[in-house]
């Protein structure tokens, strides 16, 4: 099992109309400052050896001023020496919103599944999610949203439900067309301003 | 795999039949005699001399000159492959192996041997380690459970499939008290040759089967299972309970998704997606089975509650909303008609409490008006037989409306032996009765969910449109 490089995953999904938040590998703090362009950014260490970035302190959030970016970059650089090879990813910050998880998994017997759930810190606590076998159709996607206890939070109106249904259909299509990919995690996806941004991506083959 | 011959045999050999009442083969033969099987019976036992239970016996299967449609094999596991081989050579059309002692106790090679013989003769084989088949219509009973220990269900439209023999016999015993009849019972054990896909495939096209209730521990052929699930639920409801819910996948989780998507979750997703009705316990298997067996599909969630006890009506309302259903609103015509028909103490609104002295006339009037209201999708009638007004005439009223109107109806009647008598009257007439408004609400919810599913499924792939 191999985790696909972040930017490769980012581009694969982008080509299929699945948007993740703007991101770029940065090799220096200057590069990170240029990427920020005055907007708040996130810096993350990406390494096969660090699956849970937040827990290991390999993420710095809400960096806006050049000084902040500079010091966080050197801090992450120092920590990352233990988990070589690594790269440092800069991402634009997303506004606050509702966090959901969209995923894909492969079952030995039944094949590929897609999953939708209330995300962020609530995933493990509430375990509020819906799964369907791929490929899914419109009815399946809708019934996934309907099934969630948190339906009123993540899809309070027809428009937001439509957004989720379309995203689920795209993810199912992508997952089915990429035969070698066995697991997929868009976690979290943040719903804000009538749109969504995938903040973290994980494709495993 | 064609199961027709196994399900409707004209001649049955019982291998391992015995005069000794302690032997499984004795009980099976005795059961066949007791249920009045009309085909030919051939007791087979290597040590047999003369008759067994008054029927001419044979030492070996190939001593029987006539064709044998089904061999029921109840001999020690180690000898099963060679017995099956003899059956194959003798041209036996199908076999049920009730003997245990195969893969379930680690004897994997023995089971593979059995599978090899079945394959060689293209013989459908049920089991091993199973109870086999019961069919009250065709008078078939391969169960090795003594008749007096198990209440046997009457003839009906529910087919019950169970991987486990123990769950199978328990549920069969309980079914006979739930007032619905059995089409077929199939216990398939280790699923070595005939598996859940073959069985669903058979039952999907079986005209005697209106509803399938299923105890499943695991499906062997994942994608085929999905296809057959899709095909079957387009034709009839399947209520399913999965054993082994809490079993944790041993796989180390690489992602959040993988850690959430455990084995039960996977099954549950398949069940939901392809229109199975999920039962969370054995009680629900029966509760859902009986509403599907007798009631028409339900295209909406507006439920009219009428009751002869106020508090139970309140609980019923809670039950509806907890299950995503709602209390119906009556039209002004219905309200006016009810106002005329009911005494002044009755408040005309749903849930409608017709008071403790409500008799059959009050029930009749209410059901007549409400069943014709276009704003009502289904009726929950609460009849508390402890009240002064309720007697057999109330049960007769509920039977009349429950079986003649086009909308589904469920009855709630909790109580002791007086209630039990009336519950039986109603259930045997085809009106499902529940002990609590909560379970009645759950059953209605299951009916409505399946109705929604089938409407969508027919639109999506009933017309030959591919599921993409």
Image (cartoon, grey):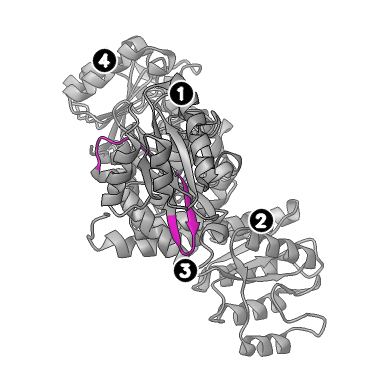
Q: Number of labelled discs?
A: 4
Nearer to us: label 2 or label 4: 2
Identify the secondary structure beneath mark 3.
Answer: helix
Judging depth in this view, the residue of B461 and A197 nearest the camera is A197
Location of the C terminus of chain B (image quadrant): bottom left
Mark 1 surroundings within 10 Å by alpha-carbon count, few (fewer than 14), some (14 through 19), many (20 or more): few
Relative to B199, is B114 above or below? above
**Numbered circle sitting on residue B113:** 4
Q: Which residue is mark 1?
A: B250
| Residue A180 counted in the magenta span | yes
Q: Which residue is mark 2?
A: B438
Q: Are marks 3 and 4 on the same chain?
A: no
Give the spatial CA distance, label 3 vs label 2.
31 Å
Relative to B255, is A151 above or below? below
Give the spatial CA distance, label 4 vs label 1.
30 Å
Q: Residue at x 48, y 67 (%)?
A: B298
Judging depth in this view, the residue of B319 and A158 nearest the camera is A158
Q: Which residue is mark 3?
A: A158
| Residue B80 counted in the magenta span | no
Location of the N terminus of chain B (image quadrant): top left
């Amino acid at each position: 099992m191999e985790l696909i490089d972040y930017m490769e995953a980012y581009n694969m999904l982008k080509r299929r109309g699945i948007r993740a938040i703007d991101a770029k590998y940065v090799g220096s703090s200057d590069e990170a400052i240029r990427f920020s362009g005055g907007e708040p950014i996130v810096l993350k260490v990406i390494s096969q050896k660090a699956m849970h970035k937040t827990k290991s302190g390999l993420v710095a959030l809400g960096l806006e001023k050049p000084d902040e970016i500079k010091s966080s970059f050197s801090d992450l650089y120092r920590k990352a020496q233990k988990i070589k090879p690594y790269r440092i990813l800069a991402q634009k910050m997303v506004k606050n919103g509702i966090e959901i998880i969209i995923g894909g998994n492969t079952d030995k017997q039944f094949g590929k599944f897609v999953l939708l759930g209330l995300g962020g810190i609530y995933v493990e606590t509430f375990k509020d999610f819906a799964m369907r076998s791929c490929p899914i159709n419109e009815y399946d996607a809708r019934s996934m949203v309907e099934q969630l206890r948190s339906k009123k939070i993540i899809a309070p109106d027809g428009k937001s439900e439509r957004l989720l249904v379309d995203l689920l259909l795209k993810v199912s299509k992508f997952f089915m067309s990429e035969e070698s990919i066995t697991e997929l995690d868009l976690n979290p996806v943040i719903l804000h301003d009538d749109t969504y941004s995938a903040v973290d991506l994980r494709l495993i083959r | 795999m064609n199961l027709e011959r196994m399900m409707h045999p004209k001649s049955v050999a019982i291998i391992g039949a015995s005069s000794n009442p302690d032997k499984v083969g004795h009980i099976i033969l005795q059961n066949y005699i007791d249920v009045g099987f009309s085909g030919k019976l051939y007791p087979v036992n290597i040590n047999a001399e003369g008759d067994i239970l008054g029927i001419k016996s044979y030492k070996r299967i190939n001593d029987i000159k006539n064709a044998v449609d089904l061999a029921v094999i109840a001999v020690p596991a180690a000898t099963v492959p060679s017995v099956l081989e003899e059956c194959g050579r003798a041209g036996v059309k199908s076999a049920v192996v009730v003997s245990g002692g195969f893969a379930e106790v680690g004897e994997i090679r023995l089971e593979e041997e059995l599978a090899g013989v079945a394959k060689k003769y293209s013989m459908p084989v049920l089991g091993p380690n199973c109870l086999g088949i019961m069919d009250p219509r065709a008078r078939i009973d391969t169960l090795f459970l003594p008749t007096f220990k198990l209440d046997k269900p009457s003839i009906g439209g529910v087919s019950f499939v169970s991987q486990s023999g123990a769950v199978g016999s328990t549920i069969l015993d309980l079914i006979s008290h739930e007032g619905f009849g059995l089409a077929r019972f199939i216990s398939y054990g280790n699923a070595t040759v005939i598996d859940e896909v073959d069985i669903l495939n058979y039952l999907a096209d079986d005209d005697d089967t209106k509803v399938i209730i299923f105890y499943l521990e695991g499906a062997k052929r994942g994608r085929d299972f999905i296809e057959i699930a899709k095909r079957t639920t387009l034709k009839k409801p399947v209520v399913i309970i999965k054993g082994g819910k809490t079993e944790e996948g041993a796989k180390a989780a690489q992602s959040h998704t993988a850690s959430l998507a455990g084995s039960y979750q996977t099954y549950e997703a398949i069940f939901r997606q392809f229109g199975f009705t999920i039962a969370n316990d054995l009680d629900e298997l029966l509760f859902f089975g009986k509403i599907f067996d007798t009631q028409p599909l339900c295209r909406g969630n507006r439920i009219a509650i009428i009751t002869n006890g106020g508090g139970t009506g309140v609980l019923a309302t809670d039950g509806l909303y907890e299950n995503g259903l709602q209390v119906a609103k009556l039209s002004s015509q219905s309200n006016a008609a009810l106002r005329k028909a009911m005494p002044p103490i009755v408040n005309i609104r749903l849930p409608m409490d017709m008071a403790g002295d409500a008799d059959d006339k009050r029930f009749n009037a209410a059901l007549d008006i409400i069943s014709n209201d276009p704003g009502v999708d289904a009726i929950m009638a609460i009849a508390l037989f402890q009240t002064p007004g309720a007697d057999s005439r109330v049960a007769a009223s509920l039977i009349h409306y429950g079986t003649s109107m086009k909308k589904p109806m469920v009855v709630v009647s909790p109580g002791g032996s007086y209630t039990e008598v009336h519950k039986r009257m109603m259930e045997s007439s085809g009106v499902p009765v529940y002990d609590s408004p909560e379970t009645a609400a759950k059953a209605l919810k299951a009916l409505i969910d399946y109705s929604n599913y089938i409407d969508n499924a027919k639109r999506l792939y009933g017309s030959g449109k591919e599921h993409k």
